[in-house]
Image (tube, grey):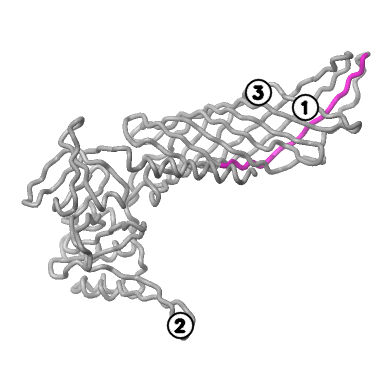
Amino acid sequence: MQKNYISALLLIALGVGCETVQAQADFRPGYLVQPAGDTVRGEIDYRDARASATQCRFRPSAGAPATVFQPADLRAYGLPGERKHYHSLTPVGAPQPAFLEVLVSGPANLYVLRTADRADHYYVATETFPLAELVHRKVMQEQASIMQEQNIYRTTLAQALVGCPVAQAQLPTLRYTAAELARAVTTYNNCQAPPETVTAADIAAAGGTPRGPRARLGIVLGAEQTIMHVRFTDMYGSQHELSFSPKVVPIGGLSLSVPLAALSRKLSLETALLYESIHYDQAFGNAYSSASDRYTFDMAYLRLPLLVRYTYPTGHVRPFVEAGPVLAYALQLNNSLVKSDNQGNASKPAGFFQDNFRSFQEGLSGSLGAQFSYAKDRQAALLVRYEVDTGWGSGQGLDTGLNHVYVLLAFDLFKQAAVK
């Protein structure tokens, strides 16, 4: 049942993100190039790779009505601040043009096109070599019952990048990745022009990785309030249900944010390694006598939330929601039970269900928060998180659980930048 809840939360988070991608506009400074060659500046709706390949939503200024341009309506458009540039081109065999993203520009151009099936297709073109797809595929050899790779892209690049021995030398072992293809095309461009004339797009691609958001490492600090519930059956068959008063304790650790750009740039995987220490010391009396039972718990955990976050992309302060499972590992689990009779005589401390300790916990978590920039484009987030978990013990006649409410501040250690 718990696995079903976890799956449901993840599907809801992904579904909300994917369904609202198309509905929410995210206008950023950009330009478009009209068929006559005139450049018009304004704002362009920043979309994911698949949507950006099919249309360009443009408005001349904030608040102005937006116009939707198809690839046949423009020569190019771009968002310089995001290092995204698109050319309207017609791939070989395609019935109509599309907006191909420029990965490398110069004497040789490398493009990528994200199709409706979320597959990336790469193209190369030079002044003397027409636009051609770089094809890589696997086919089944029925006689040998094996899959054979067809690295046609290497032959195409050999024809397109003729005249540069350094680039040609890379081709026999060149892998079919954006990073490797960009490296070969950039090498060719450096052969054809002095390095100082290479464009910013070339420099970004020369590092060997497609441009895009990178994973961010940060620190998390905050406080949590916990309420512990324990239900158990004693040796006489009596059932007890105890709720331990809320405890407020500090919590902190390291965080990691991984963009899920393949699904949507509004989605990310948020995880953290958090340390918490919780102490309970509480007595429960008997309604019919002065006898009491005093329970003491000392617990320390490493917690690992694995949450999918959807961030509203516009504005200086960007709200977000996140949900997902949480895992925890007990570094310390100690408890004791002291019984006092009607005369106030106390027994020696004894363990309370110590044979039923569980080192691992599972839980579900959800958060609401807002993300903002600080200190030279570093990102920070302030959030409130609610979490339920399986508690410190399990077994026949024992059921435990903790409810957590967190107030957390997470901030990046390094400046956010596009990957080179």
Circle 2 residue: 142
Q: Nearer the viewer, mark 3 or mark 2?
A: 2
Q: Is residue 238 above or below residue 188?
A: above
Instruction: Tell me the quarter of the picture where residue 313 sits.
Output: top left
Q: Say whether residue 141 is left or right of residue 107.
A: right
- Specify the quadrant that holds the N terminus: top right
| Magenta stretch bounds | 325-342
**Amino acid identity at mark 2:** Glu
347 with respect to 232 (left or right): right
The mark found on residue 247 in the picture is 3
As measured in the structure, the alpha-carbon distance from the residue carrying label 1 to the one carrying label 2 is 66 Å
In three-dimensional space, the C-alpha distance between marks 3 and 2, rounded to whole angstroms, equals 66 Å
Residue 384: in sight, yes or no? yes
Mark 1 neighbour density, 10 Å: few (under 14) some (14–19) many (20 or more): few
Q: Which residue is mark 1?
A: 241
Please tell me whether mark 3 sits on a helix, a strand or a loop.
strand
In the image, residue 51 lies at what x, y percent? 29, 49
Give me the residue at 33% from left, 39% from top.
23
